[in-house]
Image (cartoon, rainbow, N blue to C red):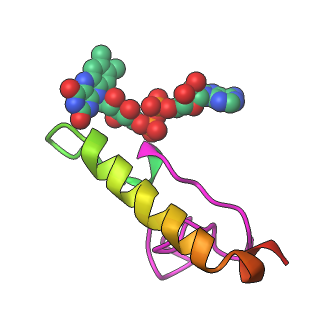
Amino acid sequence: MGANARQSVVDSHCQVHNAKGLFVIDGSTTPTSLGVNPQVTILAIAEKSAEWIAENFEAVAN
Ligand SMILES: Cc1cc2nc3c(=O)[nH]c(=O)nc-3n(C[C@H](O)[C@H](O)[C@H](O)COP(=O)(O)OP(=O)(O)OC[C@H]3O[C@@H](n4cnc5c(N)ncnc54)[C@H](O)[C@@H]3O)c2cc1C
């Protein structure tokens, strides 16, 4: 995850760079092992991304 399309696959909303409407929302967006149990972090990122999709649905879907 990151702002730079050359260095990351998805942006801060888990949307794939240059592929509007395609989201990757799971543990794969963490670049390395977190070192602690990851489930709550993954759920929190998923919830934030879902909220953003809901708020921007028209722009994402069209
Ligand atoms: C034994 C074990 C114990 C764990 N204990 C903890 C813990 O105590 N605390 C903690 O925080 N974390 C724990 N974790 C880690 C945590 O479960 C994972 O990091 C987290 O579930 C990853 O979420 P995810 O959405 O990326 O993947 P997953 O939860 O694995 O979800 C992937 C989903 O994609 C589906 N899927 C796969 N392939 C396809 C396909 N081709 N088409 C459609 N669907 C598909 C699968 O059925 C699954 O529902 C544990 C993991 C394991 C294995």
Q: How many marks?
A: 0
Q: Residue at x 64, y 74 (%)?
A: 17
* Quarter holding residue 10: bottom right
Q: Residue at x 47, y 82 (%)?
A: 3
Secondary structure predominantly adopted by residues drawn in magenta: loop
In the picture, measured across the screen, residue 62 lies left or right of residue 27, that is: right
Judge whether 43 appears above or below 59 on screen: above
Closest to the observer: 22 or 50? Answer: 50
Q: Residue at x 44, y 74 (%)?
A: 2
Closest to the observer: 27 or 53? Answer: 53
Closest to the observer: 55 or 25? Answer: 55
* Residue 44 percent location from the top left of the image: 33, 56
Q: Residue furthest right?
A: 62
Q: Which residues are magenta?
A: 1-27
Judge whether 23 appears above or below 34 on screen: below
Is residue 49 one of those drawn in magenta?
no
Q: Residue at x 52, y 74 (%)?
A: 11
* Quarter holding residue 48: bottom left
- Quadrant containing the N terminus is bottom left
- Quadrant containing the C terminus is bottom right
* Residue 8 percent location from the top left of the image: 50, 69
Judge whether 46 appears above or below 10 on screen: above
Splitting the image into four quadrants, where does ligand 1 fall?
top left
Is residue 26 one of those drawn in magenta?
yes
Q: Residue furthest left?
A: 36
